[in-house]
Image (spheres, rainbow, N blue to C red):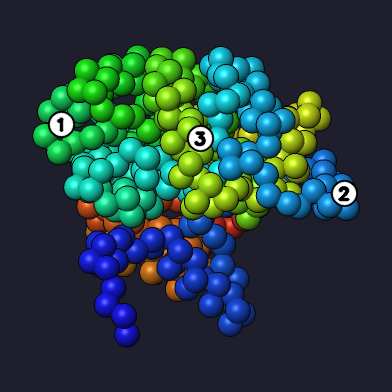
């Protein structure tokens, strides 16, 4: 067997995927499983997008696109950011990628040196650490608290920045907590990074799924940051593998050069289809679905409190609830297995998102229908009564 690179031992196992595989095996065996685990919307691409794909395929538009993506799509994304999130962007700064994962891979390849540290909050989306590791860097999780909305703060940057630190990677709204960084606090955090001549990668994948007030992009605070976004969550196109990044002007050419080698381009048919996402009727559909997610959140929060699953910070975006199970007298890994095997409910143990709170927290996704959420609550109630 070939000798594996040392980094393979450092990569974190993505427990969400492992749980998904276990749940699928139980479903195949005939057990009804309600998934509150994987972060995949139950909605799929609306008919306009599917029809646009079919037209593009019939027209033979399946060849390579430019490495940075179709010009029309880059322009549409820039217009969307201006209209929805208040940021004026030159479309040339938009790089279309193979999902947000492709964008994070490119960002880390362009910015992270061998041995360079990247600060992230604990809890964080676990794959973010692996993107940094793949680029030869060192992910450094900084324990956060409910008082900080489980986010990295300006004080954290000032306190933990070290000679090897190169930058920060934050998400607003966040996976797993569903919490956003206050806009004023985000401005202070970015100022601390800029003062140290570091980079800031801001994951805005869930920005379209914000429920409290009008969301604003971090780009309204600082043009020299790297923003990551995706068609997977708000636009419900998970398997289409399409995302984008918005980069400072001087990063356009280097990122395009790397993209041309690592991916050639994002899936071209998906790019043509995604143009239909920005039509007024499609945007109305997405907004209606956003309201459905909010309704699910508002149903679950009081039900969780009733069951003894304390929610330290009310999520204001995404489709996750980060719950404290400390009062149940068990740890998250054991409770996750009991939920799955005894109640037929899949939910992710907090250890997947960092060690600081992992043993006493769980992440529940409400990316499934309200009727199934009601049944999940009933099953969890019966389990907890036992």
- Using the image as rendered, state which of residue 26 and residue 111 is in the foreground: 111
Q: Which residue is mark 1?
A: 161
**Between discs 3 and 1, the one toward the N terminus:** 1
| Left or right of residue 247: residue 196 | left
Please provide percent x and percent y for residue 195. Answer: 22, 18
SS assignment at label 2: loop
Tell me which residue sits at (55%, 72%) in the image: 24
Q: Are marks 3 and 1 in contact (CB under 8 Å)?
A: no
| Left or right of residue 131: residue 53 | right
**Number of other residues with Cα within 10 Å of mark 3, as a class: few under 14, some 14 to 19, many 20 or more:** many
Quadrant housing the N terminus: bottom left
Tag of residue 59:
2
Q: CA distance from mark 3 to mark 2?
A: 28 Å
Tell me which residue sits at (23%, 48%) in the image: 114
Residue 305 appears in the picture as rendered: no
Residue 208 appears in the picture as rendered: yes
**Number of other residues with Cα within 10 Å of mark 1, as a class: few under 14, some 14 to 19, many 20 or more:** many
Quarter of the rendering containing residue 75: top right
Q: CA distance from mark 2 to mark 1?
A: 53 Å
Reply above or below: 178 against 98: above
**Between discs 3 and 2, the one toward the N terminus:** 2
Tag of residue 245:
3
Number of the front mark, 2 or 1: 2
Please provide percent x and percent y for residue 275. Answer: 74, 35
**Between discs 2 and 1, the one toward the N terminus:** 2
SS assignment at label 3: strand
């Amino acid at each position: 067997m070939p000798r594996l690179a040392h980094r393979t031992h450092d990569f974190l196992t993505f427990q969400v995927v492992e749980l998904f595989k276990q749940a699928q095996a139980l479903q195949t065996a005939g057990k009804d499983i309600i998934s509150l685990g994987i972060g995949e919307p139950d909605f799929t691409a609306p008919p306009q997008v599917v029809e646009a794909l079919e037209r593009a395929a019939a027209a033979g538009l399946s060849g390579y696109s430019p490495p940075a993506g179709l010009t029309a799509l880059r322009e549409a994304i820039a217009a969307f950011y201006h209209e929805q999130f208040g940021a004026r962007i030159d479309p040339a700064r938009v790089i279309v990628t193979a999902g947000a994962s492709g964008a994070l891979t490119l960002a880390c390849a362009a910015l992270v040196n061998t041995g360079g540290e990247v600060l992230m909050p604990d809890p964080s989306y676990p794959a973010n650490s692996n993107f940094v590791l793949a680029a030869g860097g060192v992910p450094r999780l900084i324990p956060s608290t409910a008082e900080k909305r489980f986010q990295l703060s300006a004080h954290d940057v000032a306190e933990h920045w070290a000679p090897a630190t190169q930058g920060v990677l934050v998400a607003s709204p966040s996976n797993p907590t569903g919490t956003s960084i206050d806009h004023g606090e985000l401005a202070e955090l970015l100022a601390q990074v800029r003062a140290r001549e570091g980079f800031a990668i801001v994951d805005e994948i869930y920005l379209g799924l914000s429920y409290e007030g009008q969301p604003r992009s971090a780009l309204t605070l600082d043009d020299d940051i790297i923003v990551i976004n995706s068609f997977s969550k708000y636009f419900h196109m998970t398997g289409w593998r399409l995302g984008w990044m918005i980069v400072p002007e001087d990063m356009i050419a280097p990122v395009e050069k790397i993209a041309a080698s690592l991916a050639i381009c994002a899936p071209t048919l998906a790019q043509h289809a995604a143009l239909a996402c920005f039509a007024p009727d499609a945007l109305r559909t997405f907004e209606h679905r956003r309201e459905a997610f909010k309704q699910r959140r508002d149903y679950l929060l009081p039900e969780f409190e009733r069951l003894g699953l304390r929610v330290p910070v009310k999520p204001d975006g995404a489709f996750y609830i980060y719950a404290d199970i400390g009062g149940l007298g068990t740890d998250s890994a054991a409770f996750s297995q009991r939920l799955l095997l005894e109640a037929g409910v899949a939910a992710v143990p907090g250890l997947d998102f960092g060690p600081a709170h992992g043993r006493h927290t769980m992440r529940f996704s409400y990316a499934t229908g309200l009727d199934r959420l009601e049944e999940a609550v009933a099953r969890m109630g019966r389990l907890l009564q036992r």
